[in-house]
Amino acid sequence: MCATLWPYGAKVLVDLLRTPNLIRDCDNRDIFDEIREKSAQAQRMSLRALIIHPGAIGDCLLSLPLARFLKNALGLGGVDLMAHMDYVGFYPGRTCIDAVRSIDAVELFRLFAKADEFFVGDHDPLISTFMDYALIVSFLGTANSDFEANLMYTVHCHRSADVIILPLKPLAPSEQHVADYYCEEVTHQCALLPDWRHCPAKDQMLVTPTSEDQTQGRRMLGHAGVTSSAPLVVVHPGSGGREKCWHVDNYLAIAQAMKQRRWEVAFMLGPVEQERLGPEKMARFKACAPVLEDLTLQEVVAVLSCAQAFVGNDSGISHLAAAMGVRTCTVFGPSCAAMYQPVGPSVQVFNAELDGFTDQISTEVQEQILGSLLH
C-alpha cells in the first residue's frame, strides 16, 4: 500500500526566513509559494527507501533500474538495499544504492509467523531495522500474506510508512522484462509515482567503477599476463546452473578467433566452473589465454572496468558486465531472454539451440558473436 502524502517538519520555514534578501530574490513570487516549494523539496530529501532482496547477483542487479526510478521519481534522499552482502557489498559509491545492509543479520524469519501470533516489543531490533524508512519494497514474502501484515505492523510501530511487496517474477506468464515489470507493479501501488515508461533506466549504465577499481584491475591483469594495450575481451564460460552453460569449446573457439584479430583475451573462472570443468579442460583454457580464478565480486568489477568487451552465459557476471556498460554478448539457452537478459547500454543476446546447448559446438552462433564484437 502506498500513501499519497507524507508529513514533514517546519524547519525549512525558519531557514527560509533567515535567508538574506529572500523577498528580493523571489521577485514577484509569493514568499509562501517559495516556502511551500522549499518545504516539499526538504520533505522529499529527508525520505529514504529500503529494498529487501533475497536473490543472487543477477537478481539484485535487475532491481537497480527500480531503485533508480524510485529515487529519481520521488526525489528521495537515499535508497538502501538489504541483501546478501557477498552480492551487493560493492554497490555504495558505484550504483544508485546509498547503503547496503546484510539480510542475514536481521531476524526476518520472524515476519513469516502467523499474524495473530506475531509480537514485537518496545525495543525490538526488528522495529529499529525499519524505523528510518518512509518506503519499503520487499522481494521477500508475498502480498496479502502474514509476512506482509507483520512487516507493516512492525514498520508502523515507529512511523507511518509505505510497504510494497513485489514478486521476483511475474505471477502470470509474460515476456515483459522483469526490470520493467518491477517498475510497472510499483506504479500500480503508489499514486505518487509517474508513469514508469517516462523514466527509462534499463538501457543506462547502472554500475560505475571507480578509479581505484581500474588501477586494481590493471594490476590484476598484469599479474595474470595481460600486459599489452590491445583491447581486452573477458570470457566467462560459467553460470550457476549447468543447464545454462554453453559448450566450453564454443568459448575457446571465440577466444582463439579474437586473439588472431589482435585482441587480448582473459578467462574468468570461479570455483564452481573449475570443479565442473575438471583438470583437463582447465588446462585447455590456460593454454589458450590467461585465466583469472576465484575472484571476489569486487575484484570482478576491477577486471571488468578494464575490459572493452565481455562474452558469457546467462549468469550474474554477465549481468554485472552489462550494468557496467561493457559491450556484453550473452548466450541464452533454456532461460527466457526477453524476461531476464542483462540490462545496460551495450547488450546483445544470442539464442543458441536448446538441443545440445551444453554439449555441442555451434559455429553459427560463434560467428554471430564475433561479428558483434568486431563490428
Image (cartoon, rainbow, N blue to C red):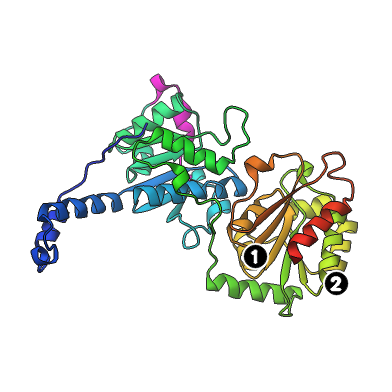
Asked if 306 appears above or below 70 in the picture, the reply is below
- State the residue in front, 365 or 211: 365
Mark 1 and mark 2 in contact? Answer it, CB < 8 Å: no
- State the residue in front, 262 or 52: 262
In this view, the mark in front (1 or 2) = 2
The type of residue carrying mark 2 is Gln
Residue drawn at 49 percent across, 50 percent down: 200
Residue 280 within the segment the image draws in magenta? no
- Residue under numbered circle 2: 260
Residue 117 within the segment the image draws in magenta? yes
Q: Which residues are magenta?
A: 105-118
Q: Which mark is residue 258?
A: none
Q: Which residue reaches farthest front?
A: 28
Give the side of residue 369 with respect to residue 287, left or right: left
- Residue under numbered circle 1: 304
**Residue 370 placement: quadrant:** bottom right
Residue drawn at 30 percent across, 53 percent down: 45
Is the stretch drawn in magenta largely helix, strand or loop?
A: helix
